[in-house]
Structures are given as structure tokens and as C-alpha cells.
């Protein structure tokens, strides 16, 4: 089943917490998940270049057993050389998912609208989705420690954000 990851607002607090819990389990036992994406292919479209995002997505996807293909703006020229519809329809024939780091949120939204492959927003000028998850992950850890230390469970500025997910 296709599930896109376009904006944080598309996911419920419960779903976001499930993602964070799964990522914690995967980090604790990477060998258990080493074949989770075996036989899958993921396109990485990076209109905006990045060292950390490129390397972490590519290595992470490969560690889960999938193959990646890295496409820069020079390779694909989103929506210019070919329409977004054509890009989406071609990629869906070859890959199971597309990770996109681009300028316009509309590019991510259009790919998701037209493609049968799942679309993951790595960054747009509108939202840095993967960074938000990383921040929520830290807040969740902070909240758990805060809860242990404070039997009354009073909210602090750093724990308030994760409580919004509940």
C-alpha cells in the first residue's frame, strides 16, 4: 500500500510515535532489519545538494537491503525537461519509493499525486520533515527522562512539543 511522507500534518501523533519507536528498535538491533527492503529500489532526487542528507539516506536505505539511484538536478531537471507527471510515471515503473530534496513543496506534492511509488519529503522550502522527526525523537527521549525525574510530570518547553503528538 502506498504511503507518502509529505508533511508532518499528514500523520497523526500516534503514527509519528510509532515511527519513532520503530526507528529506536532498528537502531538497537540493525541486523534484525537488514533485509527489510530487500529487492526494493529507491530513487534519491536531490535538486538541493546535501552531504548529510544524501549520505544518511543512501547508506540507511542500503543497510535495509534496497538499491538506490541518486539523481541530481542536472540528471532530472524536475518539471522542466519532462513534466512532473512524466517524471512520476517513469520513476514508478522502476522504483518502489522516491526520496526528494527540492525547493518547492509543489514538486513533492505533484510527484505524490501522479506516482504509484511512495514519496518521501527529505526537504522543501516549506518543511524539513526528516529534521522534524529527529527533533521529536530527542524531545521524546527528554520527555521520558523528565517523566521519570518528576513524578508530577510537569511540562517544560522541551517536552511540550512531544506531548502535542499524544
Image (cartoon, rainbow, N blue to C red):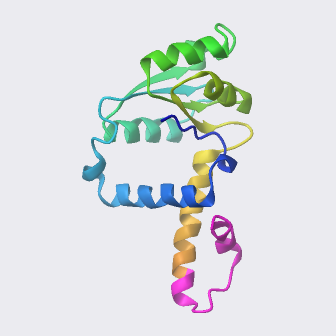
Is 17 left, or right, of 41 in this rendering?
Answer: right
Q: Is residue 154 magenta?
A: yes
Q: Is residue 35 above or below residue 47?
A: below
Q: Is residue 32 above or below residue 78?
A: below
Classify residue 94 by image quadrant: top left
Look at the image and give the residue range highlighted in magenta: 146-166
* Rendering coords of residue 166 (x, y %): 63, 68
Apparent side of residue 48 relative to residue 22 in the rendered image (left or right): right
- Residue reaching furthest to the front: 1
- Please give the count of numbered marks on the rendered protein: 0
Q: Position of residue 118 (x, y in %)?
A: 52, 32
32 vs 139, nearest the viewer = 32
**Res 23 visible:** yes
Q: Residue furthest left?
A: 31
- Please say whether residue 108 is one of the residues in the magenta stretch: no
Question: Which of 92/140 is in front?
Answer: 92
Question: Percent position (x, y) of residue 121?
Answer: 60, 37
Left or right of 5 in this view: 19: left
Residue at the image point whose x is 72% and y is 33% from the top: 105
Residue 104 in sight from this viewpoint: no
Amino acid at each position: 500500500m502506498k504511503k507518502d511522507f509529505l508533511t508532518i500534518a499528514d500523520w497523526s501523533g500516534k503514527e509519528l510515535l510509532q515511527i519513532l519507536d520503530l526507528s529506536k528498535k532498528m537502531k538497537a538491533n540493525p541486523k534484525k532489519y537488514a533485509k527489510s527492503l530487500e529487492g526494493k529500489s529507491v530513487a534519491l532526487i536531490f535538486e538541493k545538494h546535501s552531504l548529510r542528507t544524501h549520505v544518511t539516506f543512501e547508506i540507511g536505505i542500503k543497510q535495509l537491503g534496497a538499491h538506490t539511484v541518486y539523481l541530481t538536478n542536472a540528471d532530472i531537471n524536475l518539471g522542466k525537461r519532462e513534466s512532473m507527471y512524466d517524471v512520476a510515471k517513469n520513476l514508478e515503473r522502476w522504483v518502489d519509493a522516491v526520496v526528494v530534496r527540492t525547493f518547492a513543496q509543489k514538486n513533492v506534492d505533484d510527484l505524490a499525486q501522479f506516482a504509484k511509488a511512495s514519496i518521501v519529503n527529505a526537504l522543501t522550502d516549506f518543511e524539513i520533515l526528516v529534521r522534524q522527526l529527529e527533533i521529536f525523537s530527542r524531545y521524546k527521549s527528554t520527555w521520558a527522562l523528565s517523566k521519570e525525574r518528576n513524578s508530577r510530570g510537569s511540562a517544560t518547553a522541551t517536552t511540550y512539543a512531544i506531548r502535542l503528538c499524544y
